[in-house]
């Protein structure tokens, strides 16, 4: 039974069933992955408020004792899943942003893979954008750390000709447009259609750095 | 500089139509204030009616005399906060102001109010978004159409192509992000960026940027504001 190291596998995990001959460590890891995947699925389905450990156990086909060996409580489990999802999305977007092409083009490419990632896993999108906010005061810290991580990816844009490097929060307001639109679509259960936002969001994200003409050209100049 | 007043006395100043039964109104206002405070501290999900009751120093029975449940109280608190924000924005403008100037003044006044009352800021911009997107949308549409009609009334052509509806969310995220870092008191430092956000859809990028820069230049430097907030 292949057990991948890729964290995004928690979005498409398979249950290893029956006698599998896996080492204890591998089993524990896959049990942890299954619990993380399950907590995402159950939270997206029922909402955090109604999500109970027993639902997660049912969904993951993992025992209660194992759950409490791995996590303190349902919130601990959800936060662990959230962290894994954020890491994976950030890595996906970040690697699309690297390279030597013109910065606006790379932003468009990064946005495209980011929207693709979210559209392919609407449950993850819902947990990250909608449900996280309902967990209580911890949500604020999580939001801020996560948002900053994506905002920092745009710092390179301040080097563009004519970019307002004297207004450093311009990166936050650029990123905020993407966050808001993605949030709106996800909150309205339209996460699977996020790909269609690519031209609009490319434009809104780029405008503060490069102005409206270049932003528009980049938004509509792509191959798709 | 705005004098520090309690949220309640602020409301008194802004709303001169004091009804006859002042006692009952004051009691209701205390409950609303307590809701704002409690939500700011614990988020809506973590707040119980017991928190509000103890925060307002009233009895549980009194709470239920005013509100059937936590949600209704929350809605009333939101209406109150929005009224406050709207009032300071209007109060800040003078009849002869050029449009861009009026927008700068209104923005500055709103940021000052939010900085003076971090729990109001946390409540109005943090809690609401996640708990009641429909209500937020209503306020967003009101705010944006007010801005839009001001722009058209001034006889200005629309020069920007950014979506006006995003302006509200952009500003909200910026403020929320600062609050999450415990930088509520420094919110007025966001003035250039918020002015840019408000003008971008109407004036376009170049002019919005110019106005944003002029606010940061005219601001008295206290050593921290020039360095940016991030």
Image (cartoon, rainbow, N blue to C red):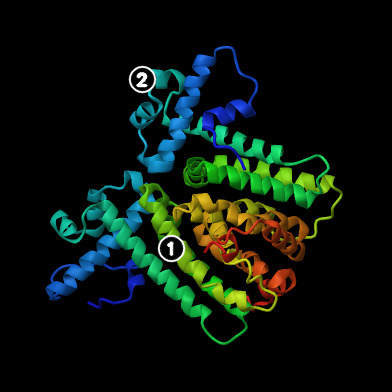
Q: Which mark is residue B59?
A: 2
Between residue A155 and residue A72, name the one nearer to us. Answer: A155
Task: Quote the CA–CA distance across marks 1 and 2.
Answer: 41 Å
Neighbours of disc 2 within 10 Å: few (<14), some (14-19), many (20+): few
Q: Quadrant of residue A60?
A: bottom left
The residue drawn where x is 48% and y is 54% is B183
Chain for numbered disc 1: A
Provide residue B224's location: percent of width, then percent of height.
Answer: 55, 61
Residue B172 showing in the rendered view: no
Residue A79 showing in the rendered view: yes
Vertically, is A6 above or below A64? below
Neighbours of disc 1 within 10 Å: few (<14), some (14-19), many (20+): some
Q: Which mark is residue A146?
A: 1
The single residue placed furthest to the bottom in the displayed view is A100
Provide residue B110's location: percent of width, then percent of height.
Answer: 62, 44
Vertically, is B58 above or below B110? above
Between residue A176 and residue B86, name the one nearer to us. Answer: B86
Q: Are marks 1 and 2 on the same chain?
A: no
Between residue A119 and residue A215, name the one nearer to us. Answer: A215
Vertically, is A224 above or below A133? below
Query: Horizontally, is B69 left or right of B195 in the view?
Result: left
Q: Quadrant of the N terminus of chain B?
A: top right
Provide residue B150's location: percent of width, then percent of height.
Answer: 78, 45
Chain for numbered disc 2: B
Query: Horizontally, is A198 left or right of A3 in the view?
Result: right
Between residue A114 and residue B223, name the one nearer to us. Answer: B223
């Amino acid at each position: 039974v292949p057990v991948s190291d890729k964290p995004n596998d928690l979005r498409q995990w398979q249950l290893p069933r029956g006698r599998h001959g896996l080492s204890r460590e591998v089993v524990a890891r896959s049990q942890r992955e299954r619990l993380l995947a399950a907590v995402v699925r159950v939270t997206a389905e029922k909402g955090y408020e109604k999500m109970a450990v027993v639902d997660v156990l049912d969904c993951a086909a993992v025992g209660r004792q194992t759950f409490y060996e791995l996590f303190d409580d349902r919130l601990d489990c959800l936060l662990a899943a959230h962290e894994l999802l954020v890491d994976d999305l950030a890595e996906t977007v970040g690697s699309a942003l690297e390279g030597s092409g013109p910065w606006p083009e790379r932003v468009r490419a990064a946005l495209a893979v980011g929207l693709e990632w979210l559209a392919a896993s609407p449950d993850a999108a819902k947990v990250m954008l909608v449900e996280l906010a309902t967990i209580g005061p911890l949500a604020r810290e999580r939001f801020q750390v996560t948002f900053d991580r994506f905002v920092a990816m745009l710092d390179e844009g301040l080097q563009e000709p004519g970019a307002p490097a004297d207004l450093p929060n311009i990166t936050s307001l650029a990123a905020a447009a993407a966050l808001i639109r993605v949030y709106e679509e996800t909150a309205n259960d339209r996460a699977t259609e996020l790909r269609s936002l690519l031209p609009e969001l490319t434009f809104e994200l780029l405008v503060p750095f490069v102005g409206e003409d270049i932003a528009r050209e980049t938004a509509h100049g792509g191959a798709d | 500089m705005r004098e520090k007043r309690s949220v309640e006395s602020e409301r008194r100043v802004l709303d001169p139509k004091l009804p006859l039964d002042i006692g009952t109104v004051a009691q209701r206002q205390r409950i609303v204030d307590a809701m704002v405070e409690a939500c700011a501290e614990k988020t809506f999900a973590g707040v119980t009616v017991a928190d509000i009751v103890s925060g307002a120093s009233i009895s549980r029975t009194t709470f239920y005399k005013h509100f059937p449940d936590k949600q209704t109280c929350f809605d009333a608190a939101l209406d109150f906060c929005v009224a406050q924000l709207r009032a300071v924005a209007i109060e800040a403008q003078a009849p002869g102001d050029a449009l861009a100037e009026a927008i700068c003044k209104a923005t500055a006044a709103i940021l000052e109010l939010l900085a003076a009352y971090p729990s109001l800021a946390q409540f109005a911009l943090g809690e609401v978004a996640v708990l009641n997107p429909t209500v937020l949308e209503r306020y967003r549409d009101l705010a944006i159409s007010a801005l839009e009609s001001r722009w058209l009334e001034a006889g200005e052509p629309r020069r920007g192509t950014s979506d006006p509806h995003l302006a509200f969310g952009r500003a909200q995220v910026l403020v929320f992000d600062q609050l999450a870092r415990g930088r509520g008191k420094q919110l007025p430092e966001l003035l250039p960026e918020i002015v840019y956000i408000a003008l971008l859809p109407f004036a376009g990028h170049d002019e919005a940027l110019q106005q944003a820069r002029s606010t940061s230049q005219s601001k008295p430097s206290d050593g921290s504001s020039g360095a940016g907030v991030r």
